[in-house]
Amino acid sequence: MQALLKRWTHALLEWLGVTSSSSDTLDRWVALLLVLLAAALLDLFLQLVVVRAIRRLVEHTRVKWDDKLFSVPVLNRSCHVLIAILLAIVLPMIFDEGSAAQTVTLRLTQIGIVVTFMRLINALLCAAFHIVSLRPSWQNKPIKGLRQTAQGIASLIAVILIVAILIDKSPVKLLTGLGASAAVLMLIFRDSIMGFVSGIQLSANNMLQVGDWISVPKYGADGTVEEVSLTTVKIRNWDNTLAMLPPYLLTTDSFTNWHAMQLSGGRRVMRSVSIDMTSVRFCTPEMLRHFRKIDLLRDYIDRTEQRIEAYNASHGIAPGERKINGLHQTNLGVFRAYLVRYLEHEVPVNKTMTLMVRQLQPTETGIPLQLYFFTDTVVWEEYEGIQSDVFDHVLAAVPEFGLRVFQNPAGSDVAALGDLFQGDSDTADPLSPLPSNPSEPLPASSSDAFTPGPEGAKPGEGVAPETMSAPKTTT
């Protein structure tokens, strides 16, 4: 091989009109250039002809996994490995045995083989993990961190081999020396090691998948997981900002994964309306007659009244006795029953999940009346629309039952109260919720509504809004 290269080199130099009788140095450098040029041409031929031919064969197969295993990057890097091996065989022959030039060339070609092999292994790892990710059981799993770990190990081995080639020592001796600096290496690669372990925990316990909606309030992250790598979990928040968290934080700190809610087919609504406690009272016959006009309550009112009358009769309680004795309906209880039936019949709720309307502990702001139910959709926009529609209706329906919603006084309330104390009712804001006459009852919300009388009022003592007289003004 060496003699053949020399003959080619002499022929090229004579064709160029250059004599090499004074020294062989020029011959060797020209031979080096010829070998490198031949290697480049061979690499180009392999990529343009052989790689394309293999790709055509792969594309006509029935299976799909070979499209990734024999992808263009894998085949191109395989060609580079072949070229590096040929150069490692041919280039040292150009120089004299044992010369410094031969030693340098030999080490450089060996390093080239290590680098090309490392690049081929990285390409194979990418292809293998891509094939695995196509399996249904591995879809959306955070396996990118595992791939990066494998690539990191391959790169570390390549670096050790390159250093061993440069210093002309055995890699085993080099690894023995690195054992003493293990603490330093662990400190340098702390995040990578913890990310690798956390990635295994997240995958094995199915705690997190790409595409999940998670909330980590402690670190201001609330959005969709876009990527799980060896050192970073990328979360796109709902305001389109990106939050980057180390994977080990998700195994050491708590976070909320909303993926189970999305799979359940229902999203919870749990919101309260504070009712003014002074507006709660026993129902009068006029109130019950009014409630019977509501389609959702007609059957409930009749059944409940029958049960109450039977109970009171069995305990010797006459119908005309005080409301405090025996069982009697209250406007708040009827309102709760109405809300339950309204949610069941008028709202798109998930009927397989919990639905209730309950009272919470009374506070200084009234009695919290909580609606607890699940919508039949998990789409955010639809969920918010259903929730808003429900509470729009609740707030509008409260006055129909003689109840009031508690809220802190607004500026217009304070101004109207000042006008009331000054006796200047003509300048009072007509839109103020406070009446200009303290004795005037609160207006109802519809034309057929009523204003309930005081507790214990006899039939006929409720005042209908159409019979109320205009308030008298004082001078």
Image (spheres, helix red, strand yellow):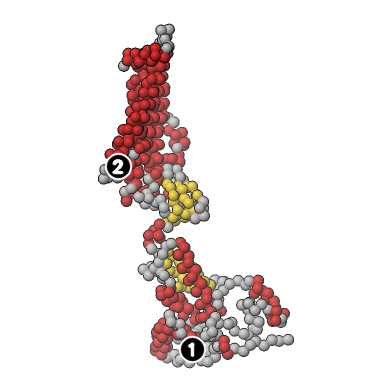
At label 1, the amino acid type is Pro
335 is higher (above) or lower (below) than 222: below
Answer above or below: position of 137 versus 350: above
- Residue type, label 2: Glu
Viewer-proximal residue among 13 and 463: 13
Q: Residue at x 36, y 25 (%)?
A: 39
Q: Position of residue 434 (x, y in %)?
A: 63, 78
Categorize mark 2 by other alpha carbons within 10 Å: few (<14), some (14-19), many (20+): few
- Say what secondary structure mark 1 lies in: helix
Quadrant position of residue 104:
top left
Q: Which residue is mark 1?
A: 285
Q: How far apart are the alpha carbons under marks 2 and 1?
A: 83 Å
Q: Quadrant of the C terminus?
A: bottom right
Q: Position of residue 429 (x, y in %)?
A: 66, 77
Can you say whether 256 is above or below 473 in the image? Answer: above
Q: What residue is shown at x 37% (from left), y 60% (from top)?
A: 263
Residue bearing mark 2: 59
* Callout in the foreground (2, 1): 2
Specify the quadrant that holds the N terminus: top left
Depth check: 178 or 432 in front?
Answer: 432
Using the rendered image of the protein, determine whether residue 15 is visible from the camera's viewpoint: yes
